[in-house]
Amino acid sequence: MAKQSTIFVCSNCGNESPKWFGKCPACNEWNTCYEEKQNIKNIGKAPKEKTEPTLLKDVKKQDISRNSTGFEELDRVLGGGLVKGSLTLLGGEPGIGKSTLILQICDKVQGEGKVLYVSGEESAEQIKIRADRLGINNDDILFLGETDIELIENAILKIKPKLVVIDSIQTMYSDEITSSPGSVSQVREITSRIMRTCKQALITTIIIGHVTKERKYSRT
Ligand SMILES: Nc1ncnc2c1ncn2[C@@H]1O[C@H](COP(=O)(O)OP(=O)(O)O)[C@@H](O)[C@H]1O
Ligand SMILES: [Mg+2]
Ligand SMILES: [Zn+2]
């Protein structure tokens, strides 16, 4: 059943309210309120997996397997590499070099299987030009130019890559949410869907997000 509702969201902190506000009650910013229409069709649609509680002390260290990114410094920041099935957010201002760094990681990341680079920002040709410039010629990197989360999830589950890259979260959308790509509710929905899909299939994921100077997630 489709459920329509209108909520008011703070563009600064993402605080939601059923009523309009001039000053955000959560972060105290003025004039950050905007209206979002939500159309949630499939509440509780996610397949439920039965999980049993485990004694934490019995969890073996090798259960937490990590793959090196191929960059020593980055591995250190990540606590020893990318944890299998984990989701990492790579944020930064536009033009700072996120897509360039991520392409190098796609080339160098350890582990068995393919890498799936999903871009809503650039075309296959643009990524190819960048790869050539960086001297990357890798048989394991697959490119997907797509912004519809449902089609992206289908590709992820079909390919089951060792690493998925989403460039960028602001360009992706779910047609179950009526607000535009980059809006707070879209970003939240896309992130939680990717997290669920990749965690269940044990696929490591990196999501790129634009952050502006004021450390706010940009809507463009
Ligand atoms: N490590 C780097 N050193 C110098 N220039 C870089 C580096 N990484 C990226 N660039 C250049 O900076 C520009 C923006 O990089 P890009 O990866 O597209 O950034 P973003 O994805 O964050 O917007 C490009 O012209 C790229 O060639
Ligand atoms: Mg980029
Ligand atoms: Zn706020």
Image (tube, grey):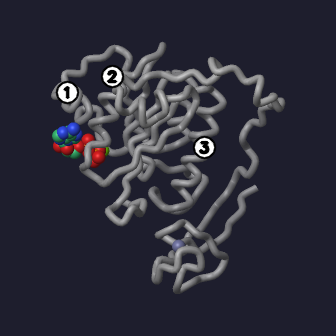
Q: Where, by quadrant of the figure, is residue 167 drawn?
A: top left
Quadrant housing the N terminus: bottom right
- In which quadrant of this rendering is ligand 1 seen? top left
Q: Establish whether ligand 2 lies closer than 8 Å to the Cβ of label 3.
A: no
Quote the CA–CA distance across marks 1 and 3.
Answer: 32 Å
Q: Position of residue 214 (x, y in %)?
A: 36, 66
Q: Which residue is mark 1?
A: 134
Q: Which residue is mark 3?
A: 193
Amino acid type assigned to the residue bearing label 2 in the image = Asp
Neighbourhood count class around disc 1 (C-alpha, 10 Å): few under 14, some 14–19, many 20 upward? few
Identify the residue at the far bottom of this view: 22
Give left or right: position of 52 versus 43.
right
Check disc 1 and report its element: helix, strand or loop.
loop
Q: Position of residue 150 (x, y in %)?
A: 56, 40
Q: Where, by quadrant of the figure, is residue 68 drawn?
A: top left
Check disc 3 and report its element: helix, strand or loop.
helix
Q: Which residue is mark 2?
A: 107
Amino acid type assigned to the residue bearing label 3 in the image = Arg
Closer mark to the observer between disc 2 and disc 3: 2
Identify the residue at the far front of this view: 57
Q: Position of residue 138 (x, y in %)?
A: 30, 17
Is residue 171 shown above or below 205? below
Residue visible at 56% across and 71% down in the picture: 9
Residue visible at 67% across and 69% down in the picture: 5
Neighbourhood count class around disc 3 (C-alpha, 10 Å): few under 14, some 14–19, many 20 upward? some
